Amino acid sequence: MNRRLITCDFYFILSIEVDIMKKIVKVEPYYEPRMWGGGKRLIEEFHYQTDIAPLGEVYNVVALPNHADCFVPNMNMTLSKLYEEKPDWFECETEQLPIRVNILDPMYDLSIQIHPDDDFAKTYNGGRGKPEAWVILDAPEDGYIEFGHYAKTKEEFISMTQNKEWDKLLRYLKTPIDGFIDIPSGTLHAIGKGVLTYNISRNADLTLRLYDYDRIDPSTHKKRPIQPEEVYENVNIPDKMITFQQYPYANEFGCKVTRYWDEPGLYTLMRIQTDTEGKFLHERFAFYTCVKGEGMINDMHIRQGETILVPNHMGWIKIKGKLDLFLASYRNQHI
């Protein structure tokens, strides 16, 4: 018998066994209190149950060991541990899970802030930069975000900040529902009150605040720390004047598929909506977060607020029910 054939058969059988061991699993959200939270929508509509208060932000996907880490009950381990112990589920080039997902529903404006790039983050706290993107799920008629600024030079930016000329410095945008906006490192930004957003970003957590409205943190009874000097060093000047984009969807096998972003080394973001049923193929791992509806993904029940992980190379998934899903994934940069 051909020894090479036996060897090939062995590895073929082994690969089948590995794929059989993969399975779709639910990912429990991670909660942290937010002083600008306190609304009821995340509890009443998204079914999030927690004693953490005030609730304003939910991490649907985060894997920062000993800091913020979702739990995967089907595997009885944290998401960071799953990423470490099951590399074949992800096949990523990164040491940590590369992406993060959260949903925000603020009752008050967030602080005016930026996220720096990788080089600064590494020297500042040993972390990584956090470019991100938002999709507006809902907003009041007068909803807005702070996004960018009007300063032409660094000196002008510093002067306006020190003199608190916020009306001259800060740029505001109205929030179109379903609008997508890209937020590169160094972009000044803040979500406004009542604006419900789905956020995808790098799996990192470094925020530099420029202004926090002189609010008192109820947990410390002091003003929250701000980092204006670090912001001056990292803010994009002049501003890139990025605006919201509305992307069309394509009808694919019973699904309305919107492809927002697919950048190697950063993240992949899509939206999949079904009226009754459909099927979808994404060969890389993906986190599916349901922002509306209830139904099934293969044999896994999912409803508004829940997130499931589909490991890579699982083939076509079958979707049943009227569902609005966001898909978060990652494409390797060097492989």
Image: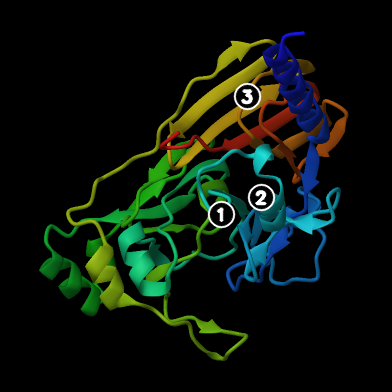
146 sits left or right of 282 in the view: left
Q: Which residue bears the numbered disc 3?
A: 282
Image coordinates of residue 310 in percent, x first then y, are 72, 34
Tag 2: Cα neighbours inside 10 Å, few (<14), some, or many (≥20)?
A: some
> Observer-nearest residue: 84 or 219?
84
Tag 3: Cα neighbours inside 10 Å, few (<14), some, or many (≥20)?
A: some
Vertical placement of residue 206 versus 180, above or below: below
Image coordinates of residue 15 in percent, x first then y, are 73, 26
Image coordinates of residue 314 in percent, x first then y, are 72, 26
Q: CA distance from mark 1 to mark 3?
A: 21 Å
Q: Nearer the viewer, mark 1 or mark 3?
A: 1
182 sits left or right of 19 in the view: left
Tell me the element at label 3: loop
Residue 96 numbered tag: 1
Q: Which residue is depicted at the point 37% across and 65% down?
A: 121
Q: CA distance from mark 3 to mark 2?
A: 19 Å
Residue type, mark 2 in image: Tyr
Report which quarter residue 320 is drawn in: top right
Q: Is residue 117 visible?
A: no
> Observer-nearest residue: 318 or 143?
318
Tag 1: Cα neighbours inside 10 Å, few (<14), some, or many (≥20)?
A: some
238 sits left or right of 175 in the view: left
> Does the residue at mark 2 contact the one at mark 1 (Cβ under 8 Å)?
yes
Q: Which residue is depicted at the point 69% across and 71% down?
A: 54
